[in-house]
Image (cartoon, helix red, strand yellow):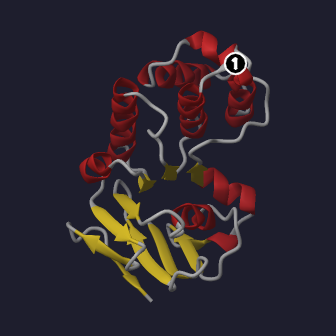
């Protein structure tokens, strides 16, 4: 379970909410409301006062790289530190294990990507392809929490449907998802609760996910 207590992000009031394993919380709000800043704060990429717990462990109780391996942020336009996606995948997997190779193949197929894209220079890959490659990179080592910032924004309808199905599979596998998307249909189909930053109060449907502004 991901638990947020009195997290202060920008000009927003302190936020407190919980997100259970296998649950999706959709974050809404106008441009500039703080959606991306919230995701980055939960990932411990930007400083933010307050407490964030994962399965009872507070983020400050572990090194930042260890936290970010478990609580993974995927930007709308992800950054790359290698010339090809294959280099980043090797970094994520740590070694070319049989399991890692199998998972790369499964994720490549699930995202509708050609295997050749893994070795193509990233400056020759389209924005939508880079977005899906970044999701592959993120899911390779199976984080506990996914922080997804506009995961289908650069995709056509067919590829957006593949990404949606893959996110749904992650939920079924017990991963928690914090989702920012301007696609209201996507949010409504995947999310069991909604957090409107204009009011900073989560509006829950099932009781499994709850939240409140502190």
Q: Secondary structure at mark 1?
A: helix
Residue pushed farthest bottom? 214
Residue 110 percent coordinates (x, y)? 42, 24
- Answer with left or right where residue 101 lies relative to residue 206: right
Query: Depth check: 98 or 2 in front?
Result: 2
Residue at horizontal 56%, vertical 25%? 129
Residue 114 percent coordinates (x, y)? 53, 12
Q: Is residue 99 above or below residue 190?
A: above
Residue at horizontal 66%, vertical 76%? 48
Image quadrant containing the N terminus: bottom left
Residue pushed farthest front? 31
Q: Residues within 10 Å of mark 1 (few under 14, many from 20)?
A: few
Query: Depth check: 38 or 53 in front?
Result: 38
Badge count? 1
Residue 20 percent coordinates (x, y)? 37, 63
Image quadrant containing the C terminus: bottom left
Query: What residue does disc 1 label?
Result: 124
Residue pushed farthest top? 116
- Answer with left or right where residue 192 lies relative to residue 111: left
Q: Is residue 37 above or below residue 182?
A: below
Residue 119 percent coordinates (x, y)? 70, 15
Residue at horizontal 71%, vertical 73%? 47
Residue at horizontal 57%, vertical 82%? 11
């Amino acid at each position: 379970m991901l638990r947020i207590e009195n997290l202060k992000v920008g000009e927003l009031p302190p936020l407190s909410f919980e997100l259970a394993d296998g649950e999706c919380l959709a974050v809404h709000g106008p441009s500039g409301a703080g959606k991306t800043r919230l995701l980055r704060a939960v990932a411990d990429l930007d400083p933010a006062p307050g407490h964030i717990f994962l399965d009872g462990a507070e983020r400050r109780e572990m090194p930042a790289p260890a936290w970010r391996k478990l609580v993974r942020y995927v930007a709308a336009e992800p950054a790359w530190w290698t010339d090809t996606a294959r280099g980043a995948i090797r970094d994520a997997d740590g070694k070319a294990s049989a399991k890692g190779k199998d998972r790369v193949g499964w994720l490549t197929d699930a995202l509708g990507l050609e295997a050749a894209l893994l070795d193509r220079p990233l400056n020759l890959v389209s924005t939508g392809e880079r977005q899906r490659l970044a999701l592959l990179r993120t899911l390779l080592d199976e984080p506990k929490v996914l922080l997804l910032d506009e995961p289908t924004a650069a995709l056509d309808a067919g590829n957006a449907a593949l990404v949606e199905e893959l996110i749904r599979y992650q939920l079924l596998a017990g991963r928690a998802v914090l989702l920012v998307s301007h696609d209201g249909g996507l949010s409504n189909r995947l999310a069991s609760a909604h957090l409107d930053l204009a009011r900073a109060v989560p509006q829950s449907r099932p009781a499994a996910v709850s939240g409140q502004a502190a």
